Amino acid sequence: MTVDITGRSASEIAADLRERIERGQLRPGDALAPVRALAADLGVNRNTVVAAYRLLAQAGLVVARGRGGTRVAGLAPVAQEGYAAGTVLRDVGTGNPDPTLIPDPAAALARSGRPVLYGEPVVDPGLEAWAREWMAEGLPDGAPRITVTSGASDAIERLLAQALQRDDAVALEDPCFLSALHTVRQGGYRAVPVAVDAEGMTVEGLRAALADGVRAVICTPRAHNPTGASLTEERAAQLRAVLADHPYVLVIEDDHFSLLSRAPLRSVIGDAQQRWARIRSVSKFLGPDMCLAVVASDDETADRLALRLTPGTTWVSHILQRLTLALVTDPEVRQGIDRAAAHYAARNDAFAAALEARGLPVSVGDGLNLWMPLPVPAARVREDLMRRGWLVRDGDHFFLSPDTAGDYLRLTVHQLDDHEATALADDLATAVAALRPTPRGGRIEG
């Protein structure tokens, strides 16, 4: 079906196809016209159609299947963080913190204070005062405005909704944190990939995304999930310089690992930036069920966020806010957070050393996970490990499109004891060795 499609530019062709998908004229599994055929029918260059299909793929509406063509995506569940349901395998792909290192909130909860009624301030004054000082590092001159949301994903969703319209472009790191990618796609925005290397978001990638017309940029300054990369000072300065030429692009900094990070914060938010927000969730050190994030932002962004946080209906519980304040200001809790940070770093370092000893080098970054490059297909390694009793997460889910995906595993190993860690390292080495090419160019199958 090509003759009814209209448009001369990639965005026009993509918009036409998107409307047909949304109206049900194109259903999940339906094949789109071959690139050359559609280009010939429309009288455009084939690269224009390629670009249109790429826009649809970045929005999660179609899936490229190589020789199988490009097909309308189904409603398969989007990959999420956390434990896999219904498996008896040892799950080392969860992305979860260690529950034994999450502080017990019972004593602090008993001091949660008086009831709060309709019409009172959305942000608890005590938490606001503490958060203003906590969030201010490296931000433009003046005290930042503080907002509280129900976690980092809620913050990103609200920030994008108050600044963007459907189909607006958002720059995302590639590979990308699953919840950010899910939030952007569910909001109907167009995800534009920005490559990540060992020093974080790349300068050329950001420059290209801005040239592509992105209206928002989401950047992880340290402990990037999944790679563990943290910005160097030089890289952060280069990114600020690029963004300085685009002062009205909304820059969102997701500092999710904050109190647990072993890397210094190097911000991409420069003095020239007019629209910006820094998000810090408490989920990694106080537990995912706390569902609270602090947002520091410029005045205009804060005012727009306030319109979406109505007192009594869409605010974050003051009990939860006071509980957070009581925990993060408790010296014993802070010592426990420091011990947790040391534990995650030590276990990741030890497991990386075990892999190195088996000929599988891994560059250890920051965060809860290890990002492991593979010399063989990741899907085949994952299947082999399942037969050996392990459930791992391969890297495909984290990339914005199949064109940018590589062979990686993201491993969450900090809860393994020494015996389990040795067993997993051995099984990984065995799985990789079984798939390496033989001297004659074949493979040794396990």
Image (cartoon, helix red, strand yellow):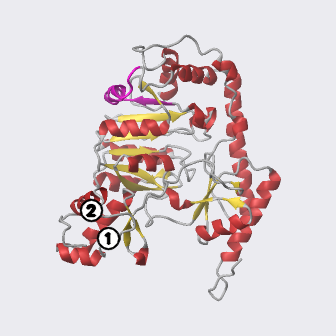
Q: Read off the residue under disc 2.
A: 17
Viewer can see residue 105: yes
The answer to whether residue 273 is seen in the rendering is no
Place residue 305 in its image quadrant: top left
Q: Can residue 28 be found in the magenta stretch? A: no
Quadrant in which the N terminus is drawn: bottom left
Magenta-tinted stretch: 293-311
In x, y percent, where is residue 281? 53, 34
Amino acid type for the residue under numbered disc 2 = Leu
Asked where in the image residue 381 lies, by quadrant, the reply is: bottom right
Q: Is residue 30 left or right of residue 428?
A: left
Circles 1 and 2: CB distance less than 8 Å?
yes
Q: Is residue 318 above or below residue 278?
A: above
- Residue 67: give x, y in percent of width and height: 41, 78
- Locate the C terminus and report the quarter of the image it occupies: bottom right
Residue drawn at the location 51% of the way across and 56% of the way down: 398
Dot 2 crowding, Cα within 10 Å, few <14, some 14–19, many 20+: many
| Residue extending farthest bottom | 440
Query: Label 1 sits on what residue type?
Result: Leu
